[in-house]
């Protein structure tokens, strides 16, 4: 290793350490921080983020990158060294386009936006949130102008979360999905068939829910000696290092699925983070490939595994152990209940069939905002008419409409990864099913280790080595396509709804 | 304000923000952090601390201090500006004597030392801790050599926690106290009288203890919208900003006093931090005067207030509400029970009469280690013989002996402040008693606000404006003296033990 590359690694791991400390500031803010300290916390986070920005884009990084790139120019382009340098170069180039003052302003604004959003959501008062959101949009547009883009302003945002993916590609995937979903939902509706979801509603003691979700996420492989689970308003997973990956859950005493499947979802994210290649800790390689790939892991454990007939059969004895009310329900009824298709207001609680239309709605609103075709003040109307058009329902309040998601407190461009995640999860699952003899039987037996091992070997251990769509193609041998997802949904719901 | 002074304040508040983030790393490490992440946490803390060190001692700070000192040379020496500059100058001068590499090594070592200590204490295995402690001593000696001192190596450490206070001064206070305490304890022993402590032992539900301590600390003024209370191994108070001051408690189901009085103690610390002058947030003035003054606040609320006859009378109905077993005990019995004098092993659980001898023992061991008159391997023997000499008892294990305190995981010099705190608390209380008409009546009525207000005005709001002994003299009109403490202890225990 050259001395420049050694210096580069030292500097990079310093940046990682500060970023991890920043993650703890956020975890704490969203779980246990006293409310009185939100402005001090905003200052702390802004300071650390500005130091990360300075170090990532400063002269030391610039010089080290140039030196290392020259020194290693003749080595294997896909070897560790050049891959690390390529990722750091991309971040450097993006970062140098943004002045530290803007980064700091955006960070400070997002903390205040979060606190305003919590209050506005409680009161279902979009007008309270609108001025903050206008500021978020203004800051985002300044960011996009500085970053530059080829075809669509959204491209500049996607490059951050989905390197190499464009607005046009996302739109193409949505175009494949949209008619198939609308057709599926309308066939379900026309069938007049319904499923009984009563077993999921009742009175579920919160402590027991906590114990049961703990059991379930542990069983699929989440390591509590390198993580923990806490209550919060909006569930999330956050990493303070691959040895400290925390998940959070929102518990609903009246509705069983909320916490249980949110826990499976966040645990899916956490399994990815806990499976990142530790030998590369502190380097650009010890990072997830993209938000979309991340979401493929959470949705796979939540849905493909967690909402399968085999999982329902496997987990039923545990459900009954914690909640005797499940004794009145057999595994098949549970399977149907957790796969009920019903147009609803809240994205994170939506079923698999309607979920992607929720994402589509947000993607369309964000696209229109960035194109200048929609004003912030008109979001509630735009939201409500899209809900009416896609789902035939209108949110009774903004809290159940455009105020439901935390994302816009931090910026735009965060939603497409959810649908990309579903798309990718099915492409991966099809390949996994070919490689493992019979994953459904494994699930039925409660043997999750072979599935996790496959994901560790094929996805997690790759870290950020490949761009997301390249990674999918490398693993599955096919380009990105919504077909496996469409087939999966059609097969699953045809059977359940007899259509 | 000159532009240099404005730049100085910006730089200083950046340092404060990073220090506050570092405090959160520690709080989390001692409360909720998964065990698997201790080495990553050590790296994170070391990185942030080295940035604080770089910024506090770098060229920017050097230039700004020089410029500002010149610009403000003719202003009032005790005005805000020059006071801030004086504190920052002192930190700069101390900091520049220590290379960043040593600071980082010490920080990293202390995190690992902490984790080793937790395990060694669990297993009561001093040999497991000894190598780590030798390294701590070696690092401390290097630090002392670099910092320099006039009379005693201990002076270099005291300057950090008690600016302006020397080893000789501490020794003088101890010399005043030592014979008085030994005499008091022996007179109590000779009296043959004892008090009934049975009301404090039993089976105390942990959730109820938590609720009761929450009530008690809230009642004396601790603000939960700017703080929180969590369980830990070794109770502490930590500030992530004056608007986020957290306390922690260790609960013992079998012994009531442990959690209750530890909570009052930590709340006393927290009241000080929550009372620091917010208008100076982010400047050197928004800091506590010293560890000793800090301890005067915790000990005042824990002991002078919390263990007074009047407080016992006031709080008894609450005790009975949470724990009906207290119905068999009247306030006078409670007062006697919480003031039982009994030589014991654990400092943090020691009574007021013996407590300072625990501190004396540690101060003597630390002094001998720094003087080179004691080897680390001989600490358990030195500890046990001092325990035998002062208290007539020998710890059954190192966990109840020299492994009981967390302090040596971070370094030496931290103990004298405890006795200084007791000394100062009584000097302040005597003055407070003259200023307020009848503080005992206020306590009896549960009216704690006038007491807190007096402390806020006289102590808390001063921040770091004065050196600790100067502050005490300014408030009370007398130099540091153990006499009020000796009188208080003699009066209290003469009555309780009829001597």
Image (spheres, coloured by chain):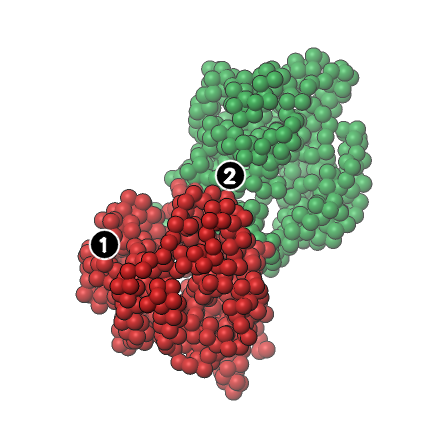
Chain colours: A green, B red
Q: Quadrant of the N terminus of chain B?
A: bottom right
Binning the other alpha carbons within 10 Å of mark 2 as few (below 14), some (14 to 19) or many (20 upward) gives some
Question: Is residue A134 rendered to the left or right of residue B277?
Answer: right
In the image, residue A464 above or below residue A305: below
Q: Which residue sits at x=19%, y=62%? A: B374
In the image, residue A316 above or below residue A100: above
Mark drawn on residue A335: none
Question: Is residue B438 rendered to the left or right of residue A113?
Answer: left
On the same chain: label 1 and label 2? no
Q: Which residue sits at x=46%, y=15%? A: A437
Q: Where is residue B225 in the image (x, y as percent from the top left)?
A: 59, 55
Q: Give me the chain letter of mark 2.
A: A
Q: Determine which residue is flagged by label 1.
A: B394
In the image, residue B465 above or below residue B27: below
Q: Do the residues labelled 1 and 2 touch (CB within 8 Å)?
A: no
Q: Where is residue A387 in the image (x, y as percent from the top left)?
A: 77, 33
Residue B155 visible in the current orientation: no
Q: Position of residue B272 (x, y in %)?
A: 50, 65
Residue toward you, A443 or A106: A443
Q: Quadrant of the C terminus of chain B?
A: bottom left
Q: Which residue sits at x=79%, y=39%? A: A382
Q: Give me the chain letter of mark 1.
A: B
Q: Nearer the viewer, mark 1 or mark 2?
A: 1
Q: How far apart are marks 1 and 2 (CA)?
A: 43 Å
Q: In which quarter of the image is residue A199?
A: top right
Q: What element carries label 1?
A: loop
Q: Position of residue A81 (x, y in %)?
A: 41, 42
Residue B387 visible in the current orientation: yes
Binning the other alpha carbons within 10 Å of mark 1 as few (below 14), some (14 to 19) or many (20 upward) gives some
Q: Determine which residue is flagged by label 2.
A: A229
């Amino acid at each position: 290793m050259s001395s420049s590359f050694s210096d580069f690694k030292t500097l990079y791991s310093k940046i990682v350490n500060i970023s991890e400390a920043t993650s703890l500031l956020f975890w704490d803010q969203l779980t246990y921080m006293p409310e009185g300290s939100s402005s001090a916390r905003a200052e702390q986070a802004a300071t650390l983020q500005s130091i990360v920005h300075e170090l990532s884009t400063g002269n030391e990084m610039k010089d080290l990158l140039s030196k290392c790139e020259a020194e290693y120019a003749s080595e294997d382009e896909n070897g560790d060294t050049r891959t690390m340098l390529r990722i750091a170069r991309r971040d450097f180039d993006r970062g140098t386009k943004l002045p530290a003052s803007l980064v700091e302003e955006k960070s400070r604004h997002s903390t205040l936006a979060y606190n305003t959003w919590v209050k506005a959501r409680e009161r279902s008062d979009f007008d309270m949130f609108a001025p903050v959101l206008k500021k978020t949009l203004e800051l985002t547009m300044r960011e996009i102008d500085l970053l530059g883009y080829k075809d669509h302003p959204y491209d500049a945002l996607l490059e951050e979360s989905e390197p190499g993916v464009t607005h046009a590609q996302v739109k193409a995937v949505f175009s494949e999905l949209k008619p198939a979903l609308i057709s599926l939902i309308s066939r379900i509706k026309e069938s007049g068939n319904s499923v009984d979801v009563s077993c999921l509603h009742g009175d579920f003691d919160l402590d027991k829910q906590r114990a049961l979700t703990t059991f379930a996420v542990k069983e699929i492989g989440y390591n509590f000696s390198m993580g923990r689970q806490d209550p919060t308003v909006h569930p999330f997973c956050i990493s303070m290092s691959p040895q400290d990956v925390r998940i959070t859950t929102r518990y609903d005493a009246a509705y069983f699925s909320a916490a249980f499947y949110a826990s499976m979802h966040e645990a899916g994210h956490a399994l990815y983070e806990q499976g990142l290649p530790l030998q590369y800790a502190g380097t650009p390689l010890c990072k997830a490939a993209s938000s979309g790939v991340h979401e493929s892991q959470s949705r796979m454990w939540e849905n493909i595994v967690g909402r399968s007939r085999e999982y329902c059969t496997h987990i039923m004895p545990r459900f009954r152990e914690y909640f005797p009310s499940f004794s009145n329900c057999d595994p098949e009824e549970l399977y149907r209940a957790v796969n009920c298709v019903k147009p609803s207001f809240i994205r994170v609680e939506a079923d698999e069939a309607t979920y992607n239309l929720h994402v589509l709605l947000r993607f369309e609103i964000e696209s229109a905002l960035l194109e200048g075709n929609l004003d912030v003040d008109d979001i509630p109307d735009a939201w409500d008419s899209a809900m009416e058009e896609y789902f035939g329902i209108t949110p009774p309040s903004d809290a159940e409409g455009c105020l439901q998601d935390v994302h816009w407190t931090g910026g735009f461009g965060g939603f497409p990864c959810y649908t990309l995640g579903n798309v990718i999860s099915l492409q991966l699952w099809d390949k996994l099913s070919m490689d493992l003899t019979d994953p459904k039987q494994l699930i039925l037996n409660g043997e999750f280790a072979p599935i996790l091992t496959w994901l560790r070997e094929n996805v997690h251990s790759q870290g950020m080595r490949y761009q997301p769509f390249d990674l999918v193609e490398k693993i599955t041998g096919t380009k990105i396509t919504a077909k496996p997802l469409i087939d999966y949904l059609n097969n699953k719901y045809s059977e359940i709804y007899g259509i």
